Image (tube, rainbow, N blue to C red):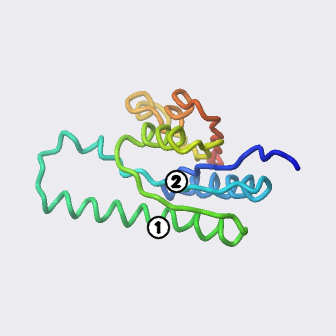
Amino acid sequence: MEKKIYKKILIATDGSAGAKKAADTGIEIARMSGAKVHTAYVIDTSSYSSVPKDPRWEEAMYAQFRELGKEATSYVEEKAKAAGVEVEALLLEGHPAEEIVNFAERNEVDLVVMGSLGKSGIERFLIGSVSEKVVRTSKVPVLVVRGKSS
């Protein structure tokens, strides 16, 4: 009996076109290797830590982020199920790169698959990209699927 190369694959998604392309790639790898897929959307709470807390605003924002997360992960869930791949969706909260890396390490993930937003110039210099940070800090192999450049 062959040993599976990948047993657990984490597909990190933000719902963008690049993330969907990455999801399609990750699902195909999972289908070929018989791996289970975890798909995660991270609600970035680090961006709002300096904003004064207004409970009504905060609850409205969280509801909106949860909805975005459900939409993003449902795409991966539907595609995985259609491909006959076991899938589990989750919403995480915190700094996206840290949450992705921590989840992968805590859950013995064999491969992280994610898209690249292709940020450039000052935006990339100021905030960096999530995929870049995950690649730099992850102990788990990371596959970054680049979107089509325009």
Label 2, label 1: how many angstroms apart (C-alpha)? 10 Å
Front residue of 112/65: it is 112
20 shown above or below 46: below
Q: Residues within 10 Å of mark 2 (few under 14, many from 20)?
A: many
Residue 136's quadrant in the figure? top right
Q: Quadrant of residue 124?
A: top left
Measuring from the top left, give residue 86's x and y in whole percent.
65, 64
Q: Position of residue 48 (x, y in %)?
A: 24, 45
Between residue 51 and residue 79, name the one nearer to us.
79
Q: Residues within 10 Å of mark 1 (few under 14, many from 20)?
A: some
Label placed on residue 107? none
Q: Are marks 2 and 1 in contact (CB under 8 Å)?
A: no
Q: Residue drawn 48% across and 36% down?
A: 129
Left or right: where 132 falls relative to 91: right
Residue placed under numbered mark 1 in the picture: 71
Residue 15 location (% of width, % of height): 50, 59
Q: Kindly identify the residue that appears in the image at 52 percent across and 53 percent down.
A: 13
Q: Secondary structure at mark 1?
A: helix
Q: Give the amino acid at mark 2.
A: Thr
Give the vertical position of 21 relative to 146 (above or below).
below
Q: Amino acid at mark 1?
A: Glu
Count the numbered circles shown. 2
Residue in view at x 12 percent, y 50 percent: 53
Which is nearer the N-term, disc 2 or disc 1?
Answer: 2
Q: Which residue is mark 2?
A: 13
Residue plotted at (36% across, 62% down)? 66
- Given residues 121 and 47, the one toward you in this image is 47
Q: Which residue is at the far right?
A: 1
SS at mark 2?
A: loop
